[in-house]
Amino acid sequence: MSQVSFVVNGKTRTLDLDTRTTLLDALREHLHLTGSKKGCDHGQCGACTVIVNGRRINACLTLALMHEGDSITTIEGLGTLDRLHPMQQAFIKHDGYQCGYCTSGQICSAVAALDEIGAGIPSHVSADLSAPPELIAAELRERMSGNICRCGAYSNIVDAITEVAERKA
Ligand code: FES
Ligand code: FES
């Protein structure tokens, strides 16, 4: 067992963990933040996406002990029932989900993806690497390609992200 401390959704949390515990299991099993989902546990579906120090990561692919001192945001920290995050509102408005299993990962990923675009970070489909990335569907689809939706809500998800992106622009 080893001890780790990190800030989760604004609160410092200290845990004694088996050194093999993934960040996803620490969040779900030890802190009972079950919004982040375990889909594949192999970095292939994106259901476990959380934001660590401003960047999205697959929480199933990283050990909790590697995050000493980090700031972690899960879906529970993005918004509350009374004050939804704009991305959560947009997913509801555009019907960007069906079963909802992938949704927390999609929303965390989308929030961080827009921050990446805002920071000028290019993607695989950015045509001009010397210009700011364009807010077009192809960019959003590429950036969200690590988040699988078995219900196939992709076009509505892109509509939701586009609305938030346009409001930010
Ligand atoms: S559960 Fe982490 S990527 Fe699928
Ligand atoms: S809403 Fe069901 S997997 Fe995406």
Image (tube, rainbow, N blue to C red):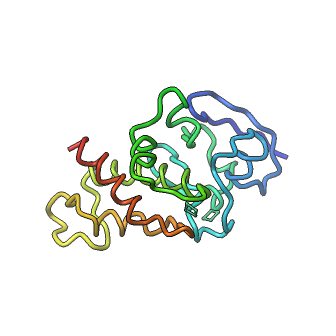
Task: State the count of labels.
Answer: 0
Give whichever of 127, 4 is nearer the camera. Answer: 127
- Horizontal side of residue 47 vs 79, given as left or right: right
Residue 119 position, x and y percent, is: 27, 49
Residue at image coords 60%, 33%: 7
- Horizontal side of residue 80 vs 22, given as left or right: left
Residue at image coords 81%, 40%: 16
Quadrant of residue 162 within the rendered picture: bottom left
Q: Quadrant of ligand 2?
A: bottom right
- Horizontal side of residue 130 vs 126, given as left or right: left
Residue 120 position, x and y percent, is: 24, 54
Residue 51 position, x and y percent, is: 51, 47
Q: Quadrant of the C terminus?
A: top left
- Horizontal side of residue 99 vs 20, given as left or right: left
Residue at image coords 41%, 58%: 157
Residue 95 position, x and y percent, is: 45, 53
Give whichever of 151, 76 is nearer the camera. Answer: 151
Give whichever of 48, 93 is nearer the camera. Answer: 93
